[in-house]
Amino acid sequence: MLTTATLNPARSTRTSRSEDKPYCSGQCRHRLLLMLLTLFAAGCAPGPESPRGFSLPIGSAEAGKQAFVELDCIACHTVTGVELPEPNEIFEVSVKLGGQVASVKTYADLVTSIINPSHKFVTGYASDQIKSGDESKMPIYNDVMTVTQLINLVTFLEEHYEVMPYQPTPYANY
């Protein structure tokens, strides 16, 4: 029990009354270090916004290109390095997809841009060209597009972006 705690300038540690025993022994320091490392590691854990652990199965880029045309994405978008058929209708502005871009950085960003187009808006276009109020002019395809089409579309588009690589979840064949 510490009754008189003093600071010993020569040793720069708190000592007990006997001056022989350091206030915090080696074992105590190890415990303190372990607690600090545990707190640090807990602070670095991915939060609910993290794409960690999110992964769709790998799709077919060719089927994704077909879905891109079938869903009439060609009316509003071009894809860098890809020849696509002429659209039946042309939107007032054609938003370029692919290449080096700042807005789509990860696999999860690409998926989010498709299923929630108002989440983030592309830069380089006049605001009134790409959105109406706070909403994207891009239609929401969530009730129209199948999950398979989404998977294939992401695979197709991903090939044309410089997207940070992701680690897909290994799925068993079924």
Image (cartoon, rainbow, N blue to C red):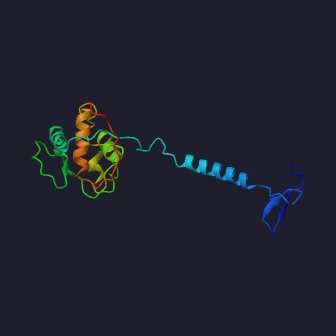
* Residue plotted at (68% across, 53% down): 30
Query: Is residue 117 at least partly visible in the picture?
Result: no
From the viewer's perspective, tell me whether residue 167 is left or right of residue 41: left
Write down the quadrant of residue 142 in the picture: top left
In this rendering, is residue 67 above or below 10?
above
Instruction: Give 30 or 114, whichever is nearer the viewer.
Output: 30
From the viewer's perspective, tell me whether residue 54 is left or right of residue 79: right
* Residue 67 percent across, percent down from the top left: 18, 39
From the viewer's perspective, tell me whether residue 7 is left or right of residue 39: right
* Residue 61 percent across, percent down from the top left: 19, 44
Residue, far bottom: 10
In this rendering, is residue 10 above or below 88?
below
Query: Is residue 140 at least partly visible in the picture?
Result: yes
Write down the quadrant of residue 66 in the picture: top left
| Total number of numbered discs in the rendering | 0
* Residue 128 percent across, percent down from the top left: 28, 49
Quadrant the C terminus occupies: top left
* Residue 147 percent across, percent down from the top left: 27, 33
Instruction: Give 30 or 9, whichever is nearer the viewer.
Output: 30
